[in-house]
Image (tube, helix red, strand yellow):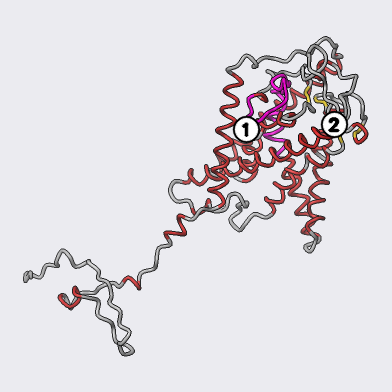
């Protein structure tokens, strides 16, 4: 033993306390052999040290599941886009022999211009907000989420061609045929309007979600005891008065798109090329109402159900942000997949024959005309 007064190198060593069920009140149990050999040193017993919840840190949380699913969606759509761009199907779908009036063409070009400006403004707002606050909020998360679900836009037709676009719009066909599970023929000829739809997904769909959130909040503020059905109905009504009107105008007035596959007796202007299925007013608002309700039910940290657990991710902030982004990507893709699958499946089993007055610029070579494919009938 050292006698020069210097502290031994092992003075910080702790010992495990022995059990002492027989000790009298106030009597401290011996800590073990080290305390007996070094009586004037203070030892820390493990039962006095707060336990570290290692299992809690490793527990699978909602954000982990949703972020993993979001990564899968990103990987699949990336492969789909690459295969489409590298293929011979990456070409414009022709308008065909039927003439589009100058007014109709002006509407298409005008909508393209408005959508492009809206997309640019939305992108500037998106970047400036993140630059100023150094964080990504719910609105910008949804902008990314809805945009990432754009690849599912042609999935409506996965069983039966039921929805088309005006091929006078700037397009390069579609990637539909490269989506796993897509069944319909000529899916790659759907004229996806590249100057219109990306902006709609990025900006308009996000706005529709927050309109639904506003309606839900308004009902709950005025009637805190309002039943769930009334809250959901308010969300639907808000989307009907905004995005659904645009949806109607696109088919009935602007002829940007068409719904040839529908129950004609349950459609506006049924039996004609500009018919609009009433059931679209039920299917289409559903994703935005669900997303708006999830925003309404955010927790005290401002996180939706799919983001919960991200606040416990350790390390650089970007890891938690990346997990939140991927989780919201998964949410929006699941909602869009649910909508397109539901209406596509329903239409497959209920559709009437295509209207006989379908112009070639709205058929997208799906059937009839220059193709040898018979248009679907019930």
How far apart are the two marked residues, 1 and 2, measured between alpha carbons? 42 Å
Q: Which residue is nearer to you in this view: 360 or 196?
A: 360
Secondary element at tag 1: helix
Q: Which residue is mark 1?
A: 124
Point out residue 95 in the picture as x, y percentages from the top left corner. 78, 13
Q: What x and y, as percent, mark residue 181?
A: 65, 31
Q: Magenta region: which residues?
A: 178-206
Looking at marks 1 and 2 on the same chain, the residue that comes earlier in the sequence is marked by 1
Q: Is residue 53 left or right of residue 92?
A: left
Pointer 1 local density, CA inside 10 Å: few below 14, some 14–19, many at least 20: few
71 sits left or right of 46 in the view: right
Q: Nearer the viewer, residue 127 or 211?
A: 211
Residue at position x 55%, y 33% in the image: 75
At 81% from the left edge and 50% from the top edge, which residue is drawn?
234
Residue 25 higher or lower than 312, as above or below = below
Q: Which residue is mark 2?
A: 351
265 relative position to 223: left or right? right
Image vertical order of residue 88 relative to residue 27, above or below: above
| Residue 26 forms part of the magenta stretch | no
Q: Residue 149 sits in which quadrant?
A: top right
Q: Quadrant of residue 218?
A: bottom right
Observer-nearest residue: 291 or 370? Answer: 370
| Left or right of residue 123: residue 251 | right
Dot 2 lies on which element?
loop
Residue 19 coordinates in the image, percent (x, y): 30, 79
Pointer 2 local density, CA inside 10 Å: few below 14, some 14–19, many at least 20: some
């Amino acid at each position: 033993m050292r006698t020069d007064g210097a502290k031994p190198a092992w003075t910080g060593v702790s010992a495990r306390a022995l059990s002492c069920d027989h000790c009298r009140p106030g009597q401290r149990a011996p800590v073990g052999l080290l305390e007996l050999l070094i009586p004037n040193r203070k030892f820390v017993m493990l039962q006095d040290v707060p336990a570290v919840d290692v299992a809690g840190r490793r527990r699978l949380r909602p954000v982990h599941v949703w972020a993993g699913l979001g990564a899968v969606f990103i990987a699949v759509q990336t492969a789909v886009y690459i295969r489409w761009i590298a293929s011979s199907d990456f070409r414009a779908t022709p308008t065909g022999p039927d003439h589009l009036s100058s007014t109709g063409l002006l509407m298409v070009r005008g909508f393209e211009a408005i959508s492009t400006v809206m997309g640019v403004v939305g992108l500037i707002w998106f970047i400036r907000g993140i630059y100023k606050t150094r964080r990504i909020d719910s609105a910008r998360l949804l902008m990314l989420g809805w945009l990432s679900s754009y690849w599912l836009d042609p999935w409506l037709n996965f069983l039966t061609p039921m929805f088309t676009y005006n091929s006078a719009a700037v397009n390069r066909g579609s990637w539909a045929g490269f989506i796993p599970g897509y069944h319909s023929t000529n899916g790659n000829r759907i004229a996806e309007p590249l100057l219109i739809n990306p902006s709609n997904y990025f900006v308009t769909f996000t706005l529709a979600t927050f309109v639904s959130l506003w309606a839900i909040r308004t009902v709950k503020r005025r009637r805190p005891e309002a039943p769930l059905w009334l809250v959901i109905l308010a969300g639907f009504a808000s989307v009907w008065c905004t995005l659904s009107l645009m949806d109607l105008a696109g088919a009935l007035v602007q002829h940007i798109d068409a719904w040839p596959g529908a129950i004609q007796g349950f459609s506006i202007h049924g039996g004609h090329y500009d018919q609009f299925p009433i059931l679209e007013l039920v299917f289409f608002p559903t994703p935005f109402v669900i997303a708006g309700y999830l925003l309404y039910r955010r927790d005290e940290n401002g996180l939706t159900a799919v983001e919960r657990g991200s606040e416990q991710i350790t390390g650089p902030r970007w890891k938690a942000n990346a997990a939140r982004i991927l989780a919201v990507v998964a949410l929006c893709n699941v909602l869009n997949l649910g909508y397109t699958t539901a209406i596509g499946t329903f239409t497959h089993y209920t559709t009437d024959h295509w209207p006989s007055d379908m112009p070639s610029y709205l058929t997208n070579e799906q059937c009839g005309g220059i193709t040898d494919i018979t248009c679907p009938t019930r």
